[in-house]
Amino acid sequence: MSDLLSALSLAARSMAAEQAGLAVTGQNIANVNTPGYTRRTIELAASPPTDTFSAGNGVNVAGIRAARATLLEAQLQHEQPAQGRAGAMADSLSQIETVLGSPGSSVDASLTRFYSAFSQLAQDPASGIARQQVLVQAQSLTSTFNDAAARLAIEQRNADAQVKSNVDQIDQLATKIAALNASISTGSATAGEAIKDQLGQALSSLSGLIDISVVPRSDGGADVSVGNGRALVTGPNVYQLGVTPRAGSGLADLTSAGSVITSEVTGGSLGGFLQVRDVLLPGYMTRLDQLAYGVATSVNAAHRAGYDLSGTAGADFFVAPAAVAGAASGMAVSAAILGNANLIAAASTTASGDNRNAMAIANLQQTPLAGGTTNPIDTWGALVYRVGTDAQAAASDKAGRDEIVKQLGTLRDQVSGVSLDEEAANMMKFQRAYEANARYFSAVETSLSVLMATLGRS
Amino acid sequence: MDADSRTTAEVAAELTAALRQVGDALVRVDADALLAAEVELNRAMANLTSVPYAGDRRQALGAVRQAQAALLRCRRLGASLSTVSRAMLSASAPAPDGYTRSGDHLDRAFIHSFMRISA
């Protein structure tokens, strides 16, 4: 009788274990599209025999575990800030590229028309129409410079708005992570796995926004720091980032516990927007200002050397820029000349019909700007080219990072839920398959270099 | 098509296609596709070294640059895969005193009494 009861008990235990396995499978299938869900595995342990004549007492559920690929999660947290940074830079730079316009249709076109107007004036220096045309093209040039400077300033403000928005998102995620840490430390083991999934998802989102250091806690939670080890989350405590207006520009500086940490943040989309706002855009703005300053001062110097229609010595053609900074946004035609086209100094002497000063100003189109080696149009071309190459480099970097993150995500999905032995076998298989191709790479590289050199010479 | 009748640009494009196949397999972490790409890469490489340089120079330069970009992509993705593989292999190999990659202690007798079911 006792044997029969034992057999029934064994069968019941085995059925319970089987049902638990089915429940885990159902849970995994139900969450196949849940972001951050980690597949669960059931661990069954043989129930030990009660006496020496028994083979065993069936099977018990030893536990349900989430198959986390912790190393790959860490690798993803390492790659995602670079992906976020490249993405933010690529997006911003593509907008800046659009703002500056294509070659031949922006500042360069206005410059060409402006110098051509002086060339036309040289053909008939007394012509009122030609003089009006110079003023029209000069105003068009100044408004093009003003517009380009304003657009770059708007892009800088847009990047600044993105910085503030990113900080808000970081603080929200930090608060969520701290709350999840608190839940993990107080919740049950089974509920803990679901919370750890949410924690992994929150850390993944956070690492796309800012470069983070994650230190796992013994209870399964995570401590997070940013910049040079600034605490963001410690257990259930959160130390939010803040923003404070920078003296002078008013742009947002990042703060942590009262200290400004803007320069410590380089990764994530926040790092990308900071790089665009604080490094790239100011560089472009300075180049634009240098061009506007160079054009205004060279035209003014030439104009002062000439004589107007009444034989009076010429004055400044453009409002003299006080400094390089702000020259593009403040560029304007002299009010006196704007009100009287006869004040345009087309002659280099007081003699009637002299056109040499108009010719001299027209020739400035081909003259390198003071302190530089390129003429105004080529200087603008160099700026547009620089923005274009920066945008292309960022887009290429983004594409590469996207692929690596996708690769790591695929690896994570492939290894989660398999045994350590299978995982190792998979890794060996991938590595061997890659090495089969990689042995050609050096030869391919050499051949392409030789081919490139040969084609370059021919 | 006879290999000798092809232009440099065509041969470089063939190499680019083979390298892209390798890159795509690396993104998908598909070992079978990687091994299949080896054959294509081998053939493209053989053609590159045997075909005389011919055709439009500008077109050929563009095709070679694309091949170089595809090779760079393979190297970048391969480096990522190698780093992860190396780290995971060393971490998953049981240490003499028996710790898993997540730091849990491995009791071998206990582990072998388990049957894992992966869903």
Image (tube, helix red, strand yellow):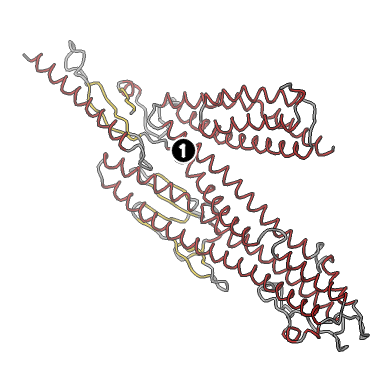
Viewer-side residue, A312 vs A88: A312
Q: Residue at x 45, y 37 (%)?
A: A71
Q: Number of callouts in the render?
A: 1
Asked where in the image residue A314 lies, by quadrant, the reply is bottom right
- Residue type at the position of mark 1: Gly
Viewer-side residue, A50 vs A117: A117
Please, is residue A181 above or below residue A128 in the view?
Answer: above
Residue A389 screen position, x and y as percent: 67, 52
A94 to the left or right of A298: left
Q: Residue at x 56, y 50 (%)?
A: A86
Name the residue that disc number 1 marks.
Answer: A409
A159 to the left or right of B68: left
Asked where in the image residue A346 lies, by quadrant, the reply is bottom right
Q: Residue at x 53, y 35 (%)?
A: B27
Residue A82 screen position, x and y as percent: 54, 48
Say which element carries label 1. Answer: helix
Residue sticking out furthest to the top: A53
Q: Give the quadrant of the C terminus of chain A.
A: top right
A250 to the left or right of A65: right
Callout 1: chain: A
Q: Give the quadrant of the N terminus of chain A.
A: top left
Please, is residue A268 above or below residue A135 in the view?
Answer: above
Crowding at mark 1 (Cα within 10 Å: few <14, some 14-19, many 20+): some
Viewer-side residue, A458 vs A186: A458
Residue B87 screen position, x and y as percent: 51, 33
